[in-house]
Amino acid sequence: MTLVSNRPVATDINDQLEGRYNGGYKEYPNSSEYRVAASSEDEFRSGLVLDRQSPHLISVPYISGTSVTEEMIDAPTTVDGLLEVLYLMRQEIFMAEGRRAADLGIRFPVCETEAANTPSAAEYTTAQIPSFIPLNQDMDAFEMDKEAKTVVIKYNMNRIIVQNKSSEYVAPFFN
């Protein structure tokens, strides 16, 4: 936690051009007043949504950051609880590094040219999406209540990783 919290942060960034309506498809929360629950069974947490509306400026870690606190690390009483916190940290810290897809067991195919020139790559020309991954964009689904300023994520994917930790696709700590 000390390493993550000591990484440099860019402050006073004007991100007001960042549209939160995603081309009219899905509206996203745009105020720090929103509280977010990782699923309908999880508690709401504050501080996860940045207020990008004028006149607000935002702060963003140069490398990466996490919303996980030392209290959240100390709270779990089971291996599964601690593993869920670990995967939340990996989700937040390594998002830009592309680790999230690998953590979920998703493998993208290599291109046909590479497969044709590298015989050992031939078996990797088809995408791998484990059966526990919600389809039809449900992995990113959430319900937003503008009145209550809450967001409830449909699937806590960190919990799904933990629930499938014995799968060959995820949780290298157990395989």
Image (tube, rainbow, N blue to C red):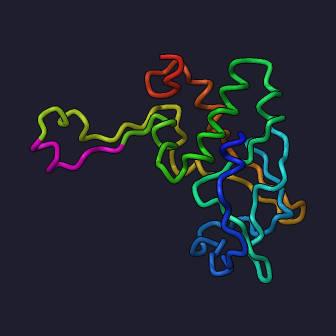
State how many labels appear: 0
Q: Position of residue 25 (x, y in %)?
A: 59, 69
Vertical arrangement, residue 37 with respect to residue 30, above or below: above
Please tell me which residue lies in front, 163 or 131: 163
Q: Residue furthest right?
A: 148
Q: Position of 90 compared to 82: left or right? A: left
Vertical arrangement, residue 23 with respect to residue 38, above or below: below
Vertical arrangement, residue 26 with respect to residue 142, above or below: below
For the stretch drawn in magenta, the main secondary structure is helix
Q: Position of 150 compared to 78: left or right? A: right
Q: Position of residue 163 (x, y in %)?
A: 62, 24
Q: Position of residue 58 (x, y in %)?
A: 73, 70
The residue depicted at 83 percent of the width and 65 percent of the height is: 146
| Quadrant housing residue 11 | bottom right
The residue depicted at 75 percent of the width and 18 percent of the height is: 78
Magenta stretch bounds = 108-117
Q: Position of residue 148 (x, y in %)?
A: 90, 60
